[in-house]
Amino acid sequence: MDAWHRIGIGNRLGQMNVPVLNCHRHGRYRVIPPSNALKLVNAIPGAWLAQFNGGGHAFMARYPRPLADLVNSLLELG
């Protein structure tokens, strides 16, 4: 996240006007800190944050139906 701001991308997140669903593992995660997910959601207008228990990068395989439902809900809002 800090690198994004150094090169100017982070400053443009507030200009996004597309649906954004940020999915992240709930709790401690060594690869990507949960604080990054919150920073993104707070920087992008209307962004959604979904947190999943466990699964790491493979949470999509562990929670396919809940994830699909979230994506469909976001797309319905357009």
Image (spheres, rainbow, N blue to C red):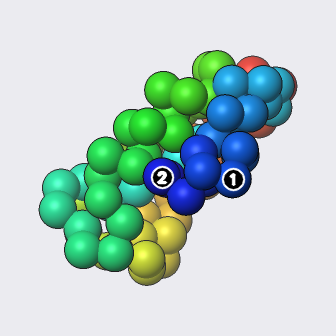
Residue 9 seen from this side: yes
> Which sits in the foreground, 54 or 14?
14
Quick check: 15 above or below 69?
A: above
Q: Position of residue 64 (x, y in %)?
A: 51, 65
Q: Which residue is mark 2?
A: 2
Residue 32's mark? none
Q: Quadrant of residue 14?
A: top right
Dot 2 and dot 1 residues touching (CB under 8 Å): no
Q: Residues within 10 Å of mark 2 (few under 14, many from 20)?
A: few
> What type is the residue that disc 2 sits on?
Asp
Which residue corresponds to the image point at 17% horizontal and 62% vertical from the top-left? 28
Quick check: 31 above or below 66?
A: below
Please identify the quadrant where the C terminus is shown: top right
> Which type of secondary structure does the marked residue at label 2 adopt?
helix
Instruction: Give the left or right position of residue 12, taking residue 56 as reference.
Output: right
Which residue corresponds to the image point at 50% horizontal and 33% vertical from the top-left? 41
- Check the image and name the residue furthest to the left: 28
Which residue corresponds to the image point at 78% horizontal and 25% vertical from the top-left? 15
Mark 2 vs mark 1: which is more N-terminal?
Answer: 2
> What type is the residue that disc 1 sits on?
Ile
Q: CA distance from mark 2 to mark 1?
A: 9 Å
> Which type of secondary structure does the marked residue at label 1 adopt?
loop
Q: Which residue is mark 1?
A: 7
Instruction: Give the left or right position of residue 3, taking residue 59 as reference.
Output: right
Q: Quadrant of residue 31?
A: bottom left
Which residue corresponds to the image point at 62% horizontal and 28% vertical from the top-left? 44
Q: Position of residue 45 (x, y in %)?
A: 64, 20
